[in-house]
Image (tube, coloured by chain):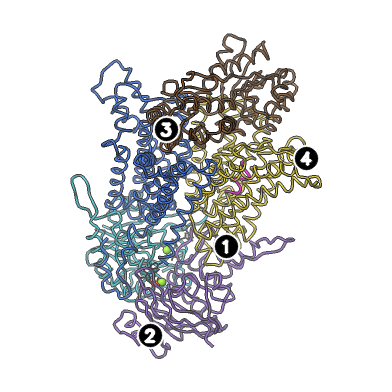
Chain colours: A cyan, B purple, C yellow, D blue, E brown
Amino acid sequence: MALLEINKVTKEFGAIRALSDVSFSIEPGEVVGLMGDNGAGKSTLVKIISGIYQPTSGSLAFEGASAHIGSPGEARKLGIETVYQDLALADNLTAAQNIFLGRELKYHVGPFRFLRHNAMNQRAAELFAELKSETRADDYVRQMSGGQRQAVAIARTRLADAKVILMDEPTAAISVRQVAEVLNLIHRLKDAGIAVILISHRMPDVFAVCERVIVMRRGTKVADKPIGQTSPEEVTALITGAKEAA
Amino acid sequence: MALLEINKVTKEFGAIRALSDVSFSIEPGEVVGLMGDNGAGKSTLVKIISGIYQPTSGSLAFEGASAHIGSPGEARKLGIETVYQDLALADNLTAAQNIFLGRELKYHVGPFRFLRHNAMNQRAAELFAELKSETRADDYVRQMSGGQRQAVAIARTRLADAKVILMDEPTAAISVRQVAEVLNLIHRLKDAGIAVILISHRMPDVFAVCERVIVMRRGTKVADKPIGQTSPEEVTALITGAKEAA
Amino acid sequence: MMANIDTQGFSNVRRTRFWQKGFLASQSAYVLGALIVIIVVMSLLSPNFLTAGNISNITRNFSFIAIATLGITLVIITGGIDLSVGSTMALSATVTSLIMGALAGASFALFPGGALILALLGGLGVAALIGLLNGFAIAKLKLSAFVTTLGTLSIVRGLTYVATYGRGTFPAGPDKDLFLLVTAGKLFNVVPIAFIYLIICAIAMWLALTHTAWGRHVFAIGSNESAGRLTGVNVDRVKIQVYMLCGLAAGFNGIIISGWLGSAPANLATAYELTIIAAAVIGGANLAGGVGGAAGAIIGCVLIEVIRNGLVLARVDPYWQQTLVGCIIVAAVLVDRLRSMRNG
Amino acid sequence: MMANIDTQGFSNVRRTRFWQKGFLASQSAYVLGALIVIIVVMSLLSPNFLTAGNISNITRNFSFIAIATLGITLVIITGGIDLSVGSTMALSATVTSLIMGALAGASFALFPGGALILALLGGLGVAALIGLLNGFAIAKLKLSAFVTTLGTLSIVRGLTYVATYGRGTFPAGPDKDLFLLVTAGKLFNVVPIAFIYLIICAIAMWLALTHTAWGRHVFAIGSNESAGRLTGVNVDRVKIQVYMLCGLAAGFNGIIISGWLGSAPANLATAYELTIIAAAVIGGANLAGGVGGAAGAIIGCVLIEVIRNGLVLARVDPYWQQTLVGCIIVAAVLVDRLRSMRNG
Amino acid sequence: QDSLVFAVVPKAMNNPFFDLARDGCEARAKELGNVTCTYIGPVEHEAATQAQIIEDLITQGVDGLAISVSDIAAATTVINRAVEAGIPVITFDSDAPDSQRSAYVGTDNKQFGTALGELLLQVKPDGGTYGMISGGAAAPNLALRVDGVREALAGSAWTEVPGSPTFSNDDIALAVQQMGDLKTANPDIDAIVPVGGWPMFAPDGWKNFVDGFKADVDSKALALVVADTLPQQLQLLSEGYAHGLVGQRPYEMGQVAMDTLLALTKGETVEDIIYTGVDVVTAENVADFLK
Ligand SMILES: Nc1ncnc2c1ncn2[C@@H]1O[C@H](COP(=O)(O)OP(=O)(O)OP(=O)(O)O)[C@@H](O)[C@H]1O
Ligand SMILES: Nc1ncnc2c1ncn2[C@@H]1O[C@H](COP(=O)(O)OP(=O)(O)OP(=O)(O)O)[C@@H](O)[C@H]1O
Ligand SMILES: [Mg+2]
Ligand SMILES: [Mg+2]
């Protein structure tokens, strides 16, 4: 049974048809690369899966049951975790506060629940160490460098008890050695049975971790192939439109 | 005579010393790569050169004369053009409006000057075609994909009559074939005698276009070498701190 | 703006339909729709609503706040706010009256209209100065626009009281008739001259906002101030200009009202700031910055005045009027939800 | 929050100095400095300023608006605004008075204090309802907070007039003395009870904002609403709660004032909204959202009241007072520039 | 005897009516020599702010208070507090009868309204429809005036139009606009009676309105009977822009307030209610008032 099934999904923004009739499915523990030129509709697809947008037509199914994902909160509850391309960070909170946003650690005092500041800071610092990132847990996100911000967004997914993780260009701004860590992370996720959809413009990364690659062009899916049956050259041709479909 | 000279520049943000005693110089037409881990201080350095931040100590010289760059406007006047990491786009304007922001094309009617909307849109469309970018000149930046936004920021520099262009991770979000175009662009800039400082986490790109690479680690410059005398492995070691200096 | 030159060849992009772009896709258009509905309802409730006399009254009444609303719309587009408009209206009117009075008693003779011109320059000069100070504090000293202009609200109103010891003033002197003519007169005996000024100001503002680099910079600042700064826009100068224009518009509006009243009471336009801001916001200006326009500002003013006037004409119990005004204002912006729904 | 666990090993990061973090690095602290200077100046200008009686007056007066300011600070932190607080104060006080009056004439007898409790519940219930409606329109219908609450400002004030036909009401009935005691009384004959309520509310708010997940979500919404939504924060619910709390705080404040006045006039707290927002903003809340706190709100209220009271006591010409109030408010936020300079 | 400081607290400082009271106080204070008149009140009409200012004046230790009461119950509380603090208090213009104030100086507002109504009957005995314009909906003295007008016209041929009175909130521009609105809403209206002088404080706005129906006004088809007798109103009346005015005497109120407070500080007893009277002005006697 497929974990996630996308069925003829179309999404229009006024005059722009960002997605037209896109269908595919993902098995548990599968790592799928999603590639395409800028504006091909990759992020739009991710946002539909994670409940930000509703498809204009088409449907989704999760774990075999047809799913209506009305909001990011619902997606999270289903076990869909996302690293957004625009990172979705609250600038006026610290790195640790952002990581734990929406799933804070608390202790009980009578009927009240208070935050465990120390525990959260410590755990966040551990996560950054794990990612080999030069990010300090108690710095405000507002004053962070681009790569540090991205590290915060990635660290978030580590807390989740997810079934599928959507990563929208998670390695765009981070440095060489952390790219390697993120790829490692994806391997570990796969081993733990968690499916991953990786969007990236970095061909080598996709070929290093993905089992399958889906290529989009101007809103339509032009290819969906096991990684072994394709090559970076073919994928590049598909992305640019030099090759129509495969 | 060096085009741009950085002299023992230090920048502190409260308790964080983002740059300590950084010095280097750039010749006209030189393409220099600036690398370093996340939070190493690369963007801070760029912002000091382009007049956003004032150094806590240290000085700059431009074309041999000591220069105090008080604002981005002054930097532009000197001939310093920048592609910022956070792109610096006005969301409520279209791509063309953003590209021409601050240097609009106008025609005169008596004492008044009105905008040449068509000319600007057309020129912007040409620029995107040149960059092989899937970006529409009259779309609002608000509704653009990450890569399209980056294309707008890059296209901007093409209008400038600059002496040096600072590019802070210009290829982070754009797709494979546009990366090639940007690298091409850098070659052409060099041929036109324009110096470029390229910040990037993509080792192959840096080695493809730069003549010299400067490596930063936690605010200090740890290496400054012609590209021929170093290797990706050495640079990686310098970035991660595995190698102290070179 | 020409859409098709560059969307050619994008297989996934249709032509934008006419109702998906420009004015028709803006909040202003939807509020205009609500306005028309309200006008129809009001004219059903009261047979006198659509009489020539009442239309002329409505036109005059909304012109009184509409010029100031144009000014504040500029400020709101840059992401700022100006609470001092009401006070500026009063001080500007007072100064104009005072100068006219003083010159009437002056020993030297001026050419006809000379006293009026000096008085107007004085009144508008004060208004521009208030705007300059606001702009300076906000752009250069980086103070919060809300607190700064709340401060000037209080300072300027206080100065109005100090200047006349709370008594208010009356325009007087040889140029008084001329003054009344240029402020309260009617063109061809029908169109209030204030309305003509409004139309001229609105056209100038529309031209400046959509067809000059300056207007583009105003939008850029409201949309992303630091991006404007980084691309070399002189953000501080534009901001100061915008606050000065807002002050000038308010001052001009105050002078017109005082001409119509024949009096510049010290409490002129008290608490008008909220009405004026509301008119701008209802007309589509966004307090977060980057959105707004001249047409919307006028639509907002008309809407507010039509509601006020209509409820009086419909002989609604005065105690209920205030409640209804609030309800209709909220209902009018609610129609804008239709737009978001239609645009997905 | 514990700083050092994770900055260890960052060669380019020093320990944060005590004045670089927490309260001392906030706008509130700098405004507190300005406040102290103003207090010193005022006490030099008027010998009566620092008398026990006057301090008690000041304490009571700022407590009157401070509770509402706490409420509006919450709203401002989420990036919203609430202009209806003044009207809510009036309606809430009016409803409480009306219920007390009605129950006094009721045929059935209640246990002692029963009428008071019912009346308070009624008054606060109305306030919460107003907040709920505001919150619903803003969070669910996505209307502009400015226009919505400007609408409620008008609606609620209108209802206050309708309820009493403009005449206002006063608390009456068997529980009147108890009502006066719990609103206008003084603890140990010195500390106004309103001040005690304020302290309790402020501590609760501080705890909620800094030590609960809810408070964290309030800040997250103001800082980046869509990020909050994307990370699963129930943005709509938190927003509605915040507007309800703001309404409740305003209503409670209105009831306290009416107790002190012994009356609930229909024009109670007219135009207080701007003062209350100003107090919050002066105290460090940022209208752009994401910044603010309980301590700052109180400091802002004290500052405004000290200026008002001090100028009266110093027998400054009343026409100049208004001007000076404005100047001092601007000057007080100007000290905050020192902070930005120091922090580079 | 040392100098005395008497504070005069108006309902709102933005109302020109109280400026005249202030001028009366200051003039009388100057004549008396050892008395200073401090004029201070809330800028806008609002009860709690007025109460706070009175508290401040108590703290400041003034020697006497003259208050134009904004809200009866609210003022009663503070007046009693002032009296407890040993400060003699009188009210002027607007009263709080159940408080411990020593005297009220001013107009009998009910009678004032009645006078307006009677003047209207005198101007146009055959009756018709009329509308009123009031100030703040919460002002008790204005409510009394409205009642007075209604009482005087009860049983006559005059009927009030629905939607009357309109509330101008003391905003002069709005008051003039409401004149136009009343006339437009009720094209056959026979009289408009503003119970305060607001619309006429804008002389040209008023003229502008009247000029639209000049013939009706001249023939008294539209009767205009207005409260207050400020100089610009008298001028308008003399030019035929109104039919009658009923005025209070704010200047006298100010003077009498000073006298009464001085008497109280000397320990003398004063009358409980001191009416300063009303002036009824029509075209016949307007010249006397214009002087
Ligand atoms: N909210 C929106 N309103 C209108 N158009 C939109 C909106 N969001 C996306 N689009 C358009 O839809 C298309 C697809 O955008 P999307 O963000 O999915 O691209 P992408 O494949 O993620 O590109 P990139 O690699 O640059 O991130 C683009 O043309 C974009 O302009
Ligand atoms: N405005 C600021 N206030 C405080 N600290 C800052 C500020 N800007 C940057 N920093 C800190 O300075 C350090 C250097 O940041 P910078 O943005 O220069 O890094 P970078 O080398 O560009 O990293 P990246 O590769 O991630 O973009 C970081 O630790 C960052 O947190
Ligand atoms: Mg994308
Ligand atoms: Mg950077």
Distance from Cα at disc 2 to Cα at disc 3: 70 Å
From this viewpoint, is residue A8 visible?
no
The residue nearer to you, when weighing D50 against C18, is: D50
Please, what is the three-letter code of the amino acid marked with disc 2? Answer: Ala
Q: Are marks 4 and 2 in contact (CB under 8 Å)?
A: no
- Secondary structure beneath dot 4 equals loop
Tell me where residue D91 appears, x and y as whole percent. 41, 31
Cβ atoms at labels 2 and 3 below 8 Å apart: no
Q: Nearer the viewer, residue C111 or A140?
A: C111
* Residue named by callout 4: C174
Q: Quick one: B111 or E38, which is closer to the camera? A: E38
Which is in the foreground here, disc 4 or disc 1? 4
* Residue C6: % across, % down: 58, 64
The answer to whether marks 1 and 2 mark residues whose Cβ atoms lie closer than 8 Å is no
- Residue A93 % position (x, y): 34, 58
Q: Which residue type carries mark 4?
A: Pro
Q: Is residue C164 above or below residue B244?
A: above
Residue B97, which numbered label? 1
Mark number displayed over residue B223: 2
Magenta span? C65-72
For mark 3, what is the residue?
Answer: D90
Chain that bears disc 1: B
Tags 4 and 3 in contact by the CB under 8 Å rule?
no
* Residue C107 in view: yes
Give SS at disc 1: helix
Q: Nearer the viewer, mark 4 or mark 3?
A: 4
Q: Secondary structure at mark 3?
A: helix
Same-chain status of marks 4 and 3: no
Query: Residue at point 54% right, 47% down?
Result: C155
